[in-house]
Amino acid sequence: MTASPPADSDGPAVRAWTGPWGMAVGAALFGLGGLVAGRLAGAAAVGWGGVLLAGGGIGAMVLLHGRRLRRVRRRAAARIDAARDDRDAAREALDTATDRIETLEEMRTAKSQFLEEISHAFRRPLTLTLGPIDTLLEGRHGALGDEVRTQLRLAERNGTRLLWLVNQLLDLAELETGRMSLTPTDGHLPSVVVQGVRSFEGLAERRNVHLHFESTLDDPVARFDETKMETMLANLLSSAFQAAGEDGTIQVIVRPCAAPPSGEPETDGLELVVEHTGT
């Protein structure tokens, strides 16, 4: 559908003959008219009519090429402007993301520093509290009655548990700042795991949970970070007690790693497995 011309215009016929394009076409038509007239008037008129016709045709081709060239330039300029807008938007998005990353890094560093400071603030009084309890339990200040010893054992267990939680915060701070490292040494892995399991025996008794340990190692000596191993085992057991619930069963196993699938290299690593009933 063609839009109707404005009210103040002379219509498409007038617009078609205005401007350079109309002048070129008019020149070509004038030359064609001169050529026709020349046939009637003589050879000289034919020559001038041919010149006018050729000039008009060349002018029309030049104008047509110029219009096409201007359209191509406008399209190229529009694409360049769009590309510049996209580039500016991408730069703005990159700057925003960079600022956000820097803010998150600052927040993470501040949180890690806070965790580290509060962990050290709690560790010292806890250590000073557990020291006298150990001294009393060792009998350095005289014999203790069974009831007193039971209460001191309970205080020692709870204090040790609280100290372990504080150490967890400190480990988290070290992990987030990338300062955590492993210090593996040769040790008797089943003995370390047994000690960790025994620290949960009181909780198992209160919740009526059956807690078992099993080892299938021919050579129990392994290379591991004892502190990190105790932390991992405590995390696994804590989760297992939450999932097992009352009257559940938790089994801790230390065994060689299962044979890898075909095509994968063999390993002499060990597995620490915590299995439980419940959810």
Image (cartoon, rainbow, N blue to C red):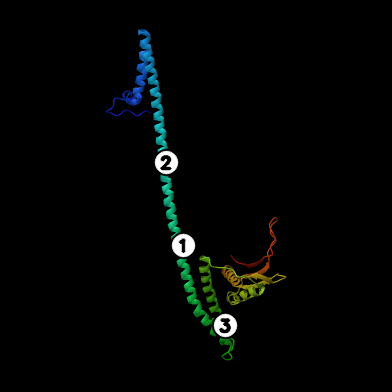
Q: Which mark is residue 153?
A: 3
Q: Secondary structure at mark 2?
A: helix
Residue found 40% across the figure and 38% down from its top: 77
If you read the primary sequence from the N terminus, does the residue marked by circle 1 or circle 2 appear first?
A: 2
Q: If the image is split into quadrants, where does the N terminus sit?
A: top left
Please report contact status of discs 2 and 3: CB closer than 8 Å, yes or no.
Answer: no
Identity, as a three-letter code, of the amino acid under mark 1: Glu
Q: In this rendered view, identify the residue nearer to me: 83 or 158.
A: 83
* Disc 1 secondary structure class: helix
Q: Position of residue 168 (x, y in %)?
A: 53, 71
Q: Residue at x 38, y 12 (%)?
A: 46
Q: How many numbered callouts?
A: 3
Rounded to the nearest whole Å, what is the CA distance between mark 2 and mark 3?
Answer: 78 Å
How far separated are the C-alphas under marks 1 and 3?
43 Å
Crowd class of label 1 (few under 14; some 14 to 19; many from 20; radius 10 Å) = few
* Quadrant in the picture for residue 185: bottom right
The x and y percentages for residue 131 are: 54, 83
Ranked by sequence position, the earlier of labels 2 and 3 is 2
Residue holding disc 1: 105
Considering every residue shown, the one lying at the far bottom of the view is: 142
